[in-house]
Image (cartoon, rainbow, N blue to C red):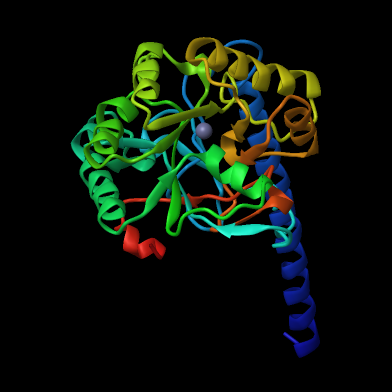
Amino acid sequence: MKKRNRYIVSLLIAIALLIFLDVMAYYTTQRYATLLATASHENTPPKKIVADFQDAPPHVSLLFLESYDPKRIKYIFSPPKPPEPVYTGYCLTVPVLMYHHVQPQAQAVEKKQTTVSMDSGVFDQHMAYLASRGYNTITVKQLVDALRTKTALPPKSIAITLDDGYRDAYEYAYQSFKRYNITANLMIPTGLLEGADYLTWGQLIEMKGSGLIYVSDHTWSHYGVGGTNAEKIKYEIMLGKSQLEGRLGQPQEIFTYPYGTFGNTAIEILKQNGFSGAFSTLPGTVQCDSFIMSLHRTRIGNSPLSAYGL
Ligand SMILES: [Zn+2]
């Protein structure tokens, strides 16, 4: 083949590849949207949770679980990344650690939840580490209030968050919180409570009563609020809020975005309804009042906490 022809063929292959990648990106985005819509359709909470996942590969920020069978996990490419946060205004360096399932590894294997679970023994070591290093564990409300009032927090302040209201939060994580006198935050999709793998209201009320646990709204059905359906977004946010306020007697003013997805519609609804701050899954430990409705969190896996710069 002539050199020129070879060049043209290479060029055509490159163009074909680009078109293919574009189509694939479109397809995965559409599929992602459909799956989220299906999962949180109407008033029926999803049977299986779509987890905002703790150990996703770097290029994947969301993971869809069709079942807990690891072979059937679908990796979903991230929706377009929101613009990089601008670290302006009043800022505090406060890591907000993000956990999901906490249970013995053997139980995670049995329940086929290994990919969304961390070992309860390792979790206990994490809590022991924070306690022995003199970390000051705070509620997410304390962090939001400090940013809003431009007040300093005690040195080594840190917030622990556990998403989604799994029953193992009571059976394992809560035991560690009590053991080391650690304050923690539970992000609760109220419609999933009382389900087979989820907390009961009784367990949540008991934990709240210990004074160690701050509970906050994570919608009713674990609904992704990144879209523009204001009516549905408001319904999900407000039903979670009213159920938590009714059962726990604690005003709801902090929100956590299911799947980490958020947009202007959700932010406006939150602001109009008494929410003073919200947490995303964007990484980072510097928290500023300029992005108080999308504060940052650090995904934590089975490595020691020292691996996360703590
Ligand atoms: Zn969640």
Q: Is residue 198 visible?
A: no
The one nearer the camera, 69 or 146, is: 146
**Lateral position of residue 19 relative to residue 282, left or right:** right
Count of residue discs:
0
Q: Position of residue 257 (x, y in %)?
A: 61, 35
Q: Quadrant of residue 204?
A: top left
Q: Quadrant of the C terminus?
A: bottom left
Q: Position of residue 270 (x, y in %)?
A: 72, 30
The residue located at (55%, 37%) in the rendering is 141
The residue located at (25%, 38%) in the rendering is 176
Q: Is residue 118 above or below residue 68?
A: below
The one nearer the camera, 68 or 151, is: 151
Q: Quadrant of the N terminus?
A: bottom right
Q: Is residue 142 above or below residue 237?
A: below
Q: Position of residue 70 (x, y in %)?
A: 37, 38
Q: Position of residue 58 (x, y in %)?
A: 52, 58
Q: Is residue 305 visible?
A: yes
**Lateral position of residue 297 relative to residue 310, left or right:** right
Q: Quadrant of residue 286?
A: bottom right
Q: Is residue 19 above or below residue 27?
A: below
The residue located at (69%, 51%) in the rendering is 289
